[in-house]
Image (cartoon, helix red, strand yellow):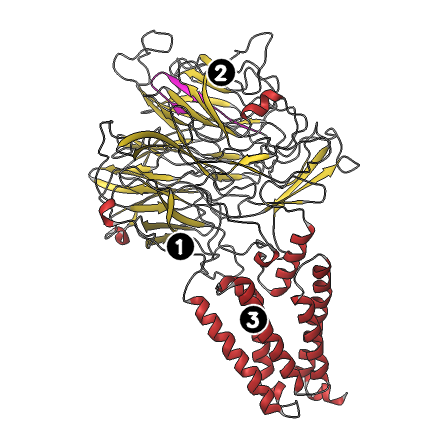
Amino acid sequence: MNWLRDAPLLAITIVLVAIMGLGLLAGGAWLEALGGSAYYLIAGIMLLLTSWLLGRRRAEALWVYAALLAGTMAWAIWEAGLDFWSLAPRGDVLVPLGLWLMLPFIASRLAPRLRAARWALGLVLVAAAIVVGMSLTSDRRDLAGTIPEGETTGAIASPEPEQPAAGQNWTAYGGSGFGTRFSSLSQITKDNVKDLKLAWEFRTGDHKGPDDPDEITNQATPLKVGDLLYTCSPHQIVFALEAATGKLRWKFDPQVQHNKAFQHMTCRGVSYHATKPGAITADGTPAPSDCAGRIFIPTNDGRMFALDAQSGVPCQDFGNQGQIDLKQGSEIQTLGFYEGTSPPVVTDKLLIVGGAVIDNYSDRVPSGVIRGFDIYSGRLIWAFDAGNSDPNEMPSASHHFTAGSPNSWSISAVDEKLGLVYVPLGSSSPDIWGGGRSPENERYDSALIALDLMTGKLRWSFQNVHHDLWDMDMPSQPSLVDLRLNGGVTPAIYIPAKTGDIFVLDRRDGRQLVPAPEKPVPQGAAKGDRLSPTQPFSELSFRPPGMLTDAQMWGSTMFDQLACRIKFKRLRYEGPFTPPSEQGTLVFPGDFGMFEWGGIAVDPQRQIAIANPQSIPFVSRLVPRGKDNPAAPNAAHPPGTELGVQPMYGAPYGVDLGIFLSPLGIPCLAPPWGNIAAIDLKSHKVVWQHRIGTIRDQAPLPLPFKLGVPMLGAPIVTAAGVVFITGTMDDYIRAFDVRDGRRLWQDRLPAGGQSTPMTYEANGKQYVVTVDGGHGSFGTKLGDYVRAYALP
């Protein structure tokens, strides 16, 4: 064995190849036993043979390795096609190792017939380089398309009034009560957007504290009214800034109690109401004269404040000196169990309010009741308690709202002309177990409900998931669109769902405008639970076709890709709506959802919608009661989180929830994990779709690889045909051409931009504003920035 001392690099190579071979042999045998690909087992055997031949200094080692590399290349193309990011983990270890074996200080120590062996391996490496080059020239996951030029201009030609849209001002979370995130401004165009510069920057000074949960984030979309911009920070501190300069005019701190047990610490925005001359209250009395303009802010400890828009002083006629207690009427009032995370709906006379209820802690949690309050006095006018046999029953000394009834933690939309508010609902608690749900809770579980504005009575409802066991809440603010169809105008509502479906209904009566037929889904619920035999599947959907296979599993190398394949094969997975199990169930689309609270952006002039779907599988594992999973809490409520072990007290199981990740902490599903896309609302077809975002801020090295990453927040679109978005996991604001999705501009942000931007005009100049506060559990950089861009 003296040659080992003479050739230490060869010795190290022999050992490493042997270790790689043993790892692939063991893992490959396990995978094949689970019914997966035999490739890894064969590759392990060939690597071990290569190592043995290298140890004997035989040139046949290069022949065997060349055969392995050629077979790997053929297998990879057969499984993944010419998709670079799918091919990369299949060859990013073997190709460099092949190059290493070609080097003189390795190859020169092998014999006989070395020249032919080196030629063979060299040719295979050249072929691999050609395959890589071909895969880089196109993106098979990309959909190229263009909106015809003639359809990108012009207003809606109909007898109906023009659809509400933001313009000089941005007065509601979604631009208007219609939730379209569309602005009629056109100063910033596709030609000059590249010239955008930072106009001003404001720091809120609100940072994560020692008593805050990990789920801390600033998801705010500011409002602009007159010369002021209104926004909020994670602890619901409200800021009024001069729209043209970003200088602070006033701020209001509601002194929210800090508590690690809170499941969220966030603010998605505030709401604005202007008192019109001669306005009357819901009681028919003249509106009070104080607070001609009002800013409404819900808080994480379950309160609602009304503030004077010019001074920030609480409006004394509203509730108790400017605030109301949203926990009133609920039997369970534990701090942090009911949180106001989203801005309420503002109408002429009423304030419509929902709230977030703690997920998966217990079946004894506060009610998710939806309420309508007098916008001036804060008096409760009506209630819709989805879990009550009479949803409109008001609270009294003898009646509390129903514990655990479906809640609305997201943002609603409103059509005041039709007199309807459209409320997206989540599921009753706990999310992942439904064996104890009442028939009343089942009616509106994970549904969109259309309520009469003045009475709160149900006009119609649409259920996105029946007997939801996958946390498939209706997560997004729906968008209201006046569709030009068949020579007329149809008032439509677009409802993005976590499942990747977009349900399209007539917003007057809930009639389907795009078919969503019921289809059979997997059965076999856990003991004591049940399942719906069918679920609705919209024909407008970003849900990937077919079922996932182990060929779609991914990793940074062939080794963690193998680990992901084994993990995939060990989980229960029979397609969408595979029920939760003790074995562990792959949930895809996952709990984050293909659509989240951001919703979509709609250009009503072009009749185009811009969407940003994402694809991240989750794993849901039911945990039976036992020593480590007691049936009742035996200690203080743990720090708030939506991942990891959730106790689900009151159910026979807890649940362990998590993202489907490789041992190295990256998604097991091949990218893209995030896209931006355009939908033609006349045909309801996807016109174009492209990856969005890089792994620059998530990888160990700041490599700007454009894989397409997850995001939180929505796009906005302007009359000039420019789309803006900030929500990706890399810290950028980007602008795209609405016609074809071509990127027009981007700029680096100082923190994560997990929010929806907005745009407005001040002193004749158009600004684009983004709130960059980061997201704790999403893993982006935390900050306290409000930034405005404008043309020089």
Q: Which quadrant would residue 496 be assigned to in this image?
A: top left
Q: Which of the image's four quarters has the N terminus?
A: bottom right
Magenta span of residues: 345-357
Q: Is residue 264 magenta?
A: no
Q: Which quadrant would residue 551 be assigned to in this image?
A: bottom right
Q: Residue at x 69, y 34 (%)?
A: 647
Q: Residue at x 65, y 23 (%)?
A: 364
Going by the numbered disc 2, the residue's amino acid type is Ala
Q: Please identify, in this view, whether the residue under mark 2 or under mark 3 is nearer the observer.
A: 3
From the image, give the main secondary structure of the stretch colored magenta.
strand
Place of residue 194 in the rendered image (x, y in percent of width and height, measured from the top left): 28, 54
Q: Which quadrant would residue 214 be assigned to in this image?
A: top right
Q: CA distance from mark 2 to mark 1?
A: 46 Å
> Looking at the image, can residue 245 be seen?
yes
Q: Secondary structure at mark 1?
A: loop
Going by the numbered disc 1, the residue's amino acid type is Leu
Circle 3 residue: 74
Mark 1 vs 3, N-terminal side = 3
Crowd rating for badge 1 (residues with CA inside 10 Å; few <14, some 14–19, many 20+):
some
Q: Is residue 414 left or right of residue 760?
A: right
Circle 1 residue: 143
Q: CA distance from mark 1 to mark 3?
A: 26 Å
Circle 2 residue: 383
Place of residue 782 in the rendered image (x, y in percent of width and height, measured from the top left): 48, 45
- The extreme right residue here reads 627
Residue nearer the viewer, 778 or 537: 537
